[in-house]
Image (cartoon, helix red, strand yellow):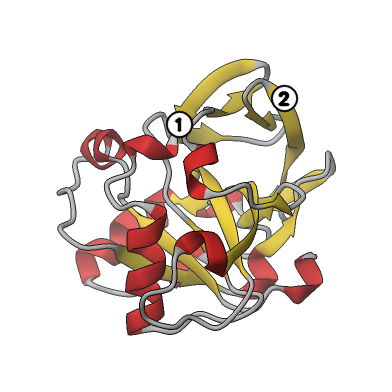
Amino acid sequence: MLTNIRNVYCVGRNYKLHAEELGNAVPDEPMIFMKPSHAVVPLNGETLELPASKGEVHYEAELVVQISQSYEPGMAVDELVEAYAFGIDFTLRDVQTVIKKKGHPWTAAKGFKNSAPVTAFQAFPGAAALLEKDFTLTKNGEEVQRGNIRNMIFSLQDIVDYVGHHYGLGPGDVIFTGTPEGVGPTQAGDVLELAWDGESLGACTIGAAQ
């Protein structure tokens, strides 16, 4: 299903505690940025080469949803989304700090190759069902992030309405919906694993790009 991915939308600062841990203001409307579709790769146990030579690389675990049809005003998220997965929004944090100060776009910090690995997509059970379980990210066997979409500032419905209205949504588009608190650095040799209600869905080993 990764071959069908078109636009990759991402929501920044969508968990209050995550915004606060980085010293950022909590947004009053969804904060949207994008990654190239080439950034999306399977989270299937293989080694992912990341550009560690450019400074700290941080992990940000997120729920990812995939769109099944073109957005029309008034559509419910449950009819618009066909599948869900979990992913990691890898971020070059030192690079991001510099470009934020300059007011430049985030692409250099967020859009590099392998910066958006995702688990296998599964049939979407409905937004309400996703509220019932937590997702987690472990680093070398230790839990570093735990999230539940009930703690998002903007709900899945808010997100699809905002993105659909301002930018458009269509089949194959995916949305990284934001990360909870606990983001941090990773380095070559680390093993990152995503789980949903305790069930492992995907993992990777971090490598260093040449």
Distance between mark 2 and mark 1 Cα atoms: 14 Å
- In the displayed structure, would residue 157 be above or below residue 189? below
- Determine the residue positioned at 47% across, 62% down: 77
Q: Does 152 sit above or below residue 71? A: above
Say whether disc 2 or disc 1 marks the residue closer to the N-terminus. Answer: 1
Residue at 37 percent across and 32 percent down: it is: 181
Percent x, y of residue 55 = 48, 48
- What residue type is disc 1 on? Gly
The disc labelled 2 sits on which kind of residue? Glu
Answer few, some or many: residues within 10 Å of disc 2's Cα (few below 14, many 20 plus, some between 14 and 19). Answer: few
Between 200 and 193, the residue placed more toward the observer is 200
Secondary structure found at label 1: strand
Label 2 belongs to which residue?
199
* Circle 1 residue: 147
User: What's the residue at 30%, 74% (across, down)?
Assistant: 104
Per the rendering, the mark at residue 156 is none
Q: Position of residue 65 (x, y in %)?
A: 57, 58
Q: Nearer the viewer, residue 10 or 157?
A: 157
Residue 199 position, x and y percent, is: 72, 25
- Other-residue count near label 1 (Cα within 10 Å), few / some / many at <14 / 14–19 / ≥20: many
Q: Quadrant of residue 106?
A: bottom left
